[in-house]
Amino acid sequence: MGMKWRHRALPAAPLTLVLLAAATGCDSGTPDARPKPTATPSASVARVCDKPAAGPAKAPAGAVTVDPAVAGDLAAKTKSSPPGTTFWLRPGKHRLDPDRYAQVVPKEGNTYLGAPGAVLDGRRTNQYAFGGTARDVILRHLTVQGFVAPHDEGVVNHDSADGWVIEHSTIRNNSGAGLMAGARQQVRANCLRDNGQYGMNAYKADGNLHDLVVEGNEITGNNTGDWERRRPGCGCTGGVKFWAVDGADVRGNWVHDNRGTGLWADTNNNDFRIEGNVLEENDGAALIYETSYNAVVRDNTIRRNNWVEGRRYADRGDTFPFATVYISESGGEPRVRARTDRIEIHRNVLEDNWSGITLWENADRFCNSPANTSSGDCTLLVKDKDRCAQPAIATAPLYADCRWRTQRVDIHDNRFVLDKSVVDCTVMCDRMAVLANYGTYPDWSPYQGERVSEAITREQHNRWHDNTYVGPWRFTAHDPSRVLDAVQWQGHPYRQDAGSTFRAQGGG
């Protein structure tokens, strides 16, 4: 289900943000050849990894005490206790039995509390820490480390059970994903750090993943396995990856220094609110929203992202505007129920990233096309991809509905700052873009030629307006060859950024 860059509800209840004071950052341990900026972050961030909240020093009344000196004690006591039991893990390093499938299998409503210094260690032997299908499990104040989940699988909530609450925990140095996600899952104030593939992989095999809350976490240093190099084009990494999630609130997180993308929503996600986060110093894009629908991206601080991946492509002479916020075949769709019918990107500050926002649509990517890297998936408007074939696909409604369309994207009241001396670049780091490729494939495609380029640029209600630009920004429209200055961008036929202001000099 991996994606490539170019060939490619119900609302959750409001919650109080878990934010801590700003800091200069923490060492993620991820290899990184970039020069590190010396500026201190000005916005509040969820500085969780350096100062995790301590768990209860004594067992709560009625709790079952788990002994770290007894291997397998946690799994055994879970098995012998009724649903709804609270377990208190004493200080020390807890172990499972030395079998790769010796994971804890909670019962419905169980609670797991770690005392200060309680660690569940997989010792590079056990694949999973917590699995099974029990609902409404709570995990708090526990460090989970050293598990070896396979590629695309996770360590905590391995089977994507519903209703889990994971709070104030440190999930670090595991293979695969630190945790998976089920419906109604709440992930708050955790340190998701230095995991092999993802901090969290929000994927559920039956597709019924909704009402997800990701709040106040520090998500850093993930993809230590460098999977995009091991499997080029897999689209299988990130601080967090979301698949077909219907309704997500992602707020107040500090997502930084991940090897690859920070936050990546991929394939038929809908109804996201991504707000109040600090997204910085990720090797790739801060945010990718791909083949998905209806989102609000607001009040985020996004800085110094995409230096590694952007520079890599520029050094190869690639003219595609690789972006820090990348909207790929995604847009607002009123027919898909959500809290908005647009993708609205507003009130964000983007500072010294490798390029800005790119709106992209691949002319050759649609349901039933061999170029569709979303495997066998189709849009949320057409359930059966086989309907997307000639002659029906050439006419309404399938001509529109068989595509994930980049449409109804509203980008306004943002501040875009670029100082090329900070980014250390001369070309291709200064772009804002709306474009598509020339359609060629397959030979029966109704989208050949410039049809999609014309549509995304002039017909699908994608708008920049009332933004502030500081620095030497340039703009790409229609296709990679059309590079514009601000006057051309604002003029006929593009007429973008009405009401926006431009100041050419770099800096803040």
Image (cartoon, helix red, strand yellow):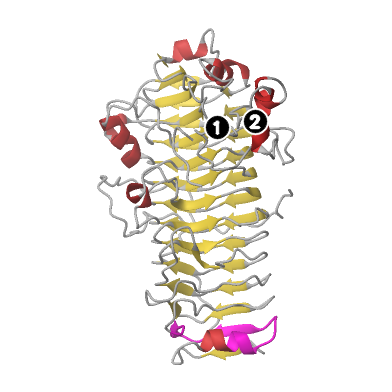
Q: Which residues are magenta?
A: 77-97
Name the residue beneath numbered marker 2.
388
Name the residue beneath numbered marker 1.
369
Horizontal side of 305 relative to 312 (left or right) equals: right
Res 495 → quadrant: top right
**151 to 416, vertically: above or below:** below
**369 to 1, vertically: above or below:** above
- Disc 2 crowd, CA 10 A, few/some/many (<14, 14-19, 20+): many
Number of numbered discs = 2
Specify whether residue 90 is in view: yes
**342 to 193, vertically: above or below:** above
Is there CB contact under 8 Å for labels 2 and 1? yes
Q: Earlier in the sequence, mark 2 or mark 1?
A: 1
Q: Residue at x 37, y 40 (%)?
A: 306
Q: Is residue 92 magenta?
A: yes
Q: Position of residue 490 (x, y in %)?
A: 51, 13
Specify whether residue 484 is in view: no
Question: What's the residue type where badge 2 is placed?
Answer: Cys
Res 316 → quadrant: top left
Q: Residue at x 44, y 31 (%)?
A: 356
SS of the residue under disc 2: loop
The residue lying furthest to the top in this view is 492
Q: Is residue 461 magenta?
A: no
Horizontal side of 104 relative to 134 (left or right) equals: left
Observer-nearest of 96 and 445: 445
SS of the residue under disc 1: loop
Observer-nearest of 142 and 393: 393
- CA distance for labels 2 and 1: 9 Å
Q: Residue at x 54, y 39 (%)?
A: 289
In which quadrant is the C terminus drawn?
top left
Question: What's the residue type where badge 1 is placed?
Answer: Ser
